[in-house]
Image: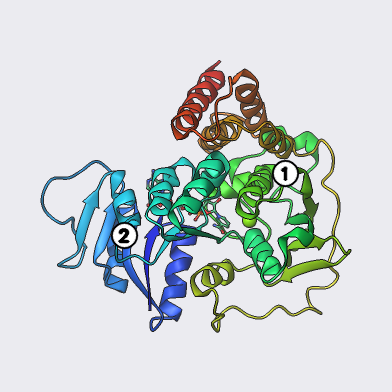
């Protein structure tokens, strides 16, 4: 039996993690859940008999909020996530929060030596140097949930890392892949949120439309697998059937294929080293044919270029990338800026940033906060 803390249980990945738990009640148990939506947290606490709940909102003194089962212990405030992530009874901490929100709790979980199943990629992009160093120092293991990274992990299992030539991440191209670039300026949030192959939370769906998501994933892969940025490539693959590939020095390409269903990589992060039966259908290779691949069209995805540039520059540039992106996407979803302003604002923040040390968590947090302010300031101009 594995005991889980699920941070961000009320979101897309968090909810699918609970679906995996529901499919394997004899193997998985939920100790704690956390998020912001109280009604959804209460419903989850009732359904899974969760003893501990974190609500990331200001403390409400006293009584249990309505809807929670008797006996549930509710922790309030941002620190609730850290407390639940370090609880001695938690075997695995699933980080399914989004953006900056999961940083402190991930760091706390790693310092507590936990197995951390991470979906919240921004945390690794911002603070990969600190998190991987702390994981090594405290005996924590970080396993990916992101489908491409789960694929890379599976392709690398049992392999000698010295034989790895390159990592290849596939990209669907997102909701706007077939759009005339001249029309991007007028794209609405509804259009950007219509992803062709995956149903996900709003921030990552917009990140897929800009291909920022794939840029973040290159940095995520760099930190997870300790492969230099210049040996990680992005390949367009519209049907999201091949999730990623590893190219070995002897010319072999090893790929992982499957239906686009996040419950598969979520379950593997929880079951590893075992493989459990899953409810997801097995891929029908014939129906999935032909598999099509292409180079990313040059100049079409400025956010991808910005992410790769920030990754190459290192230091606190990736933290600025994440902070500015989170704010820019939010402003776009609130209809306060245009779709094409997203890369413009992020690019401006990166240009004005005075970089700091990627191994210093205080400098990373400060760079993220600076980028958010800078992005809001530029948007108001
Ligand atoms: P969602 O927006 O659906 O969910 C985000 C979760 O984080 C919610 O539970 C939300 O709580 C919680 N949250 C947000 N802000 C805070 C905060 N300040 N404090 C505490 N909790 C907070 O996102 P997704 O599930 O789509 O994505 C989660 C992460 O996984 C992202 O980093 C994404 O890039 C990555 N990912 C997602 C995939 C997917 O298929 N969805 C695929 C691969 C990676 P509430 O809803 O209660 O406000
Ligand atoms: Mg992905």
Mark 2: is the Cβ under 8 angstroms from ligand 1? yes
Q: As displayed, is residue 235 above or below residue 258?
A: above
Outermost residue on the right side: it is 251
Question: 140 or 381, which is in the foreground?
Answer: 140
Mark 1: is the Cβ under 8 angstroms from ligand 2? no
- Tell me the crowding category of disc 1: few under 14, some 14 to 19, or many 20 or more residues within 10 angstroms, Cα based: some
Q: Position of residue 79 (x, y in %)?
A: 29, 45
Residue at position x 80%, y 53% in the image: 235
Question: 68 or 369, which is in the foreground?
Answer: 369
Q: Earlier in the sequence, mark 2 or mark 1?
A: 2
Q: As displayed, is residue 269 above or below residue 177?
A: below
Q: Where residue 229 is drawn, which disc sits there?
A: 1
Q: Secondary structure at mark 1?
A: helix
Position of 87 with respect to 239 (left or right) is left
Position of 20 with respect to 345 (left or right) is left
**Residue 40 visible within the image:** no
Q: Looking at the figure, which quarter contains the C terminus?
A: top right
Q: Looking at the figure, which quarter contains the N terminus?
A: bottom left
Q: Are marks 2 and 1 in contact (CB under 8 Å)?
A: no
Residue at position x 64%, y 47% in the image: 213
Distance between the Cα atoms at labels 2 and 1?
Answer: 39 Å
Q: Position of residue 56 (x, y in %)?
A: 31, 47
Asked where in the image residue 250 lies, by quadrant, the reply is bottom right
Q: Secondary structure at mark 2?
A: helix
Q: Where residue 319 is drawn, which disc sits there?
A: none
Residue at position x 67%, y 37% in the image: 311
Q: As displayed, is residue 342 above or below residue 74?
A: above
Q: Which residue is mark 2?
A: 41
Asked where in the image residue 275 lies, by quadrant, the reply is bottom right
| Mark nearer the viewer, 2 or 1 | 1
- Tell me the crowding category of disc 2: few under 14, some 14 to 19, or many 20 or more residues within 10 angstroms, Cα based: many
């Amino acid at each position: 039996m594995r005991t889980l803390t699920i941070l961000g249980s009320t979101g897309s990945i968090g909810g699918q993690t609970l679906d995996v738990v529901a499919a394997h009640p004899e193997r998985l148990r939920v100790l704690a859940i956390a998020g912001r939506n109280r009604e959804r947290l209460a419903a989850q606490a009732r359904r899974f008999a969760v003893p501990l709940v974190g609500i990331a909102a200001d403390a409400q003194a006293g009584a249990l909020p309505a809807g929670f089962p008797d006996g549930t212990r509710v922790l309030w405030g941002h620190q609730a996530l850290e407390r639940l992530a370090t609880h001695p009874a938690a075997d695995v901490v699933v980080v399914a929060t989004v953006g900056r929100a999961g940083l402190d709790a991930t760091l706390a979980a790693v310092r507590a030596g936990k197995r951390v199943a991470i979906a919240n990629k921004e945390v690794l992009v911002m603070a990969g140097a600190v998190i991987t160093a702390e994981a090594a120092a405290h005996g924590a293991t970080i396993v990916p949930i992101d489908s491409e990274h789960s694929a890379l992990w599976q392709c690398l299992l049992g392999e000698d890392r010295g034989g790895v030539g390159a990592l290849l991440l596939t990209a669907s191209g997102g909701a706007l892949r077939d759009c005339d670039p001249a029309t991007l300026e007028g794209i609405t949030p509804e259009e950007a949120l219509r992803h062709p192959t995956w149903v996900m939370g709003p921030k990552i769906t917009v990140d897929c439309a800009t291909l920022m998501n794939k840029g973040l994933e290159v940095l995520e892969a760099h930190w997870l697998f300790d492969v230099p940025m210049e040996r990680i490539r992005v390949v367009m693959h519209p049907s999201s059937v091949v999730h990623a590939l590893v190219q070995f020095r002897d010319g072999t390409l090893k790929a992982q294929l499957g239906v686009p269903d996040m419950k598969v990589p979520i379950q593997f992060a929880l079951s590893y080293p075992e493989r459990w039966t899953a409810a997801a259908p097995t891929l029908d290779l014939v129906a999935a044919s032909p598999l099509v691949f292409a180079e990313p069209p040059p100049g079409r995805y400025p956010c991808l270029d910005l992410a790769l540039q920030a990754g190459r520059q290192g230091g606190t540039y990736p933290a600025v990338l994440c902070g500015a992106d989170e704010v820019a996407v939010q402003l776009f979803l609130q209809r306060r800026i245009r779709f094409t302003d997203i890369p413009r604002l992020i690019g401006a923040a990166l240009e004005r940033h005075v970089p700091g040390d990627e191994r210093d968590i205080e400098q990373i947090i400060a760079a993220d906060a600076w980028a958010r302010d800078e992005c809001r300031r530029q948007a108001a101009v």
